[in-house]
Image (cartoon, rainbow, N blue to C red):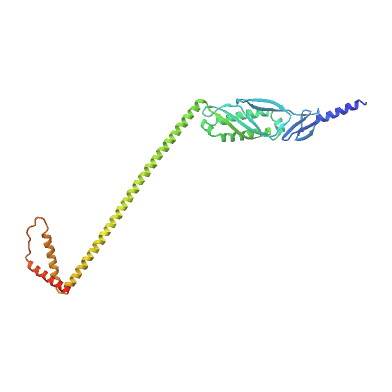
């Protein structure tokens, strides 16, 4: 009897220790009692009934990347379900675009388990299911696009993949946060053609820019010549107007001076009472001056009334003397 009690005590202690389960933060355990779901253990100290209760194993799959860049899967099981966001690096795969071009794509999937019970009981192998679903969805999405659209639509592809995967994995208790396409690699011959096309496009843009620059330079030069000619014509016009106005003012002043001089002379003659003789004499003298001009004029013709003119001149002389007095 004395030996039996220590054995029982050791058995009870061992039984209690076997039932203690410590769950880390952001982890959960699925407990089955006699093969049936019993409860989910949350982070902290928990106790289960040994032998009757057991943790349900959960399959995991991790992708290991070597130094050479090769990716290979590593499979395993665990009794603790990680609730943190996980990243799954998919191996490179070939997909066919809408225009029948085979391209190579590798992607990253970010997801987290939000319902551990569904992740265990709703799908047999969650990591494998997510991988296959992502691959088939990626093929369907890329198959609806041609090569050019695929290369420039990474954001659209990522968004579309995330929406489809998140909706499909919702019943598995999984939340897909985002999908990222790491690399899209077309075949070598397609890459060479694309490089030639890009070079031709750059040369075309350079030629267009050069032609546009020459066009703008020609337009600006023509506009400059036009403005110069307009300014020159405007200056000549203003100069001509100023010259005409100056001539006009000069002639007006000259005429006013002559009129004033004639008026003074007439007034002076009028004081003697013989203005008509003065005017007649002046006209005769002007006529004689015009007749005698010329290199070949050797004979001077005297008009018939020369004596009258002379007498008029004598009369002018006498009048001027009177005026001076």
Q: Which residue shows up at 71% across the image and 27% down it? A: 77
**Which residue occupies the foreground of this view, 124 or 265?**
265
Of all residues, the one furthest to the right in this rendering is 1
- Figure disc tally: 0
Q: Is residue 179 left or right of residue 22?
A: left
Q: Is residue 27 left or right of residue 198?
A: right
Q: Which residue shows up at 70% across the image and 26% down it? A: 76
Q: Position of residue 166 (x, y in %)?
A: 64, 34
Q: Position of residue 39 (x, y in %)?
A: 76, 33
| Residue 26, picture quadrant | top right
**Which residue occupies the foreground of this view, 133 or 304?**
304
Q: Is residue 178 above or below residue 318?
A: above
Q: Which quarter shows the C terminus?
A: bottom left
| Residue 252, picture quadrant | bottom left
| Residue 38, picture quadrant | top right
**Which residue occupies the foreground of this view, 179 or 230?**
230
Q: Which quarter shows the N terminus?
A: top right
Q: Which residue shows up at 68% across the image and 32% down it? A: 172
Q: Is residue 313 left or right of residue 237?
A: left
Q: Position of residue 191 (x, y in %)?
A: 50, 28
Q: Is residue 264 above or below residue 113?
A: below
Q: Is residue 313 above or below residue 26?
A: below
Q: Position of residue 239 (x, y in %)?
A: 29, 55
């Amino acid at each position: 009897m004395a030996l039996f009690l220590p054995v029982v005590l050791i058995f009870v202690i061992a039984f209690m220790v076997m039932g203690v389960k410590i769950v880390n933060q952001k982890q959960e355990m699925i407990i089955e009692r006699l093969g049936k779901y019993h409860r989910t253990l949350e982070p902290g100290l928990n106790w289960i009934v040994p032998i009757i209760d057991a943790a349900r194993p959960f399959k995991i799959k991790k992708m290991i990347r070597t130094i050479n860049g090769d990716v290979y899967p590593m499979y395993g099981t665990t009794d603790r379900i990680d609730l943190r966001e996980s990243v799954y690096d998919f191996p490179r795969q070939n997909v066919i675009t809408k225009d029948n071009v085979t391209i190579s794509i590798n992607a990253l999937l970010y997801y987290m388990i939000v319902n551990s019970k569904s992740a265990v009981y709703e799908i047999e192998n969650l990591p494998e299911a997510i991988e296959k679903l992502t691959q088939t969805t990626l093929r369907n999405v890329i198959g609806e696009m041609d090569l050019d659209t695929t290369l420039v639509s990474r954001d659209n592809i990522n968004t579309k993949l995330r929406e489809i995967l998140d909706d499909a994995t919702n019943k598995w208790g999984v939340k897909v946060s985002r999908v990222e396409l790491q690399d899209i690699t077309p075949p070598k011959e397609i890459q060479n053609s694309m490089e030639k096309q890009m070079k031709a496009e750059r040369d075309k843009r350079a030629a267009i820019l050069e032609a546009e620059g020459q066009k703008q330079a020609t337009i600006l030069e023509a506009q400059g010549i036009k403005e110069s000619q307009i300014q020159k014509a405007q200056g000549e016009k203003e100069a001509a107007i100023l010259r005409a106005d100056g001539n006009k003012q000069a002639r007006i002043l000259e005429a006013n001076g002559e009129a004033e001089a004639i008026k003074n002379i007439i007034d002076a003659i009028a004081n003697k009472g013989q203005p008509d003789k003065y005017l007649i004499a002046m006209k005769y003298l002007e006529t004689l001056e015009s007749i005698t001009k010329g290199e070949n004029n050797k004979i001077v013709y005297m008009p018939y009334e020369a004596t009258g003119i002379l007498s008029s001149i004598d009369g002018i002389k006498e009048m001027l003397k009177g005026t001076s007095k």
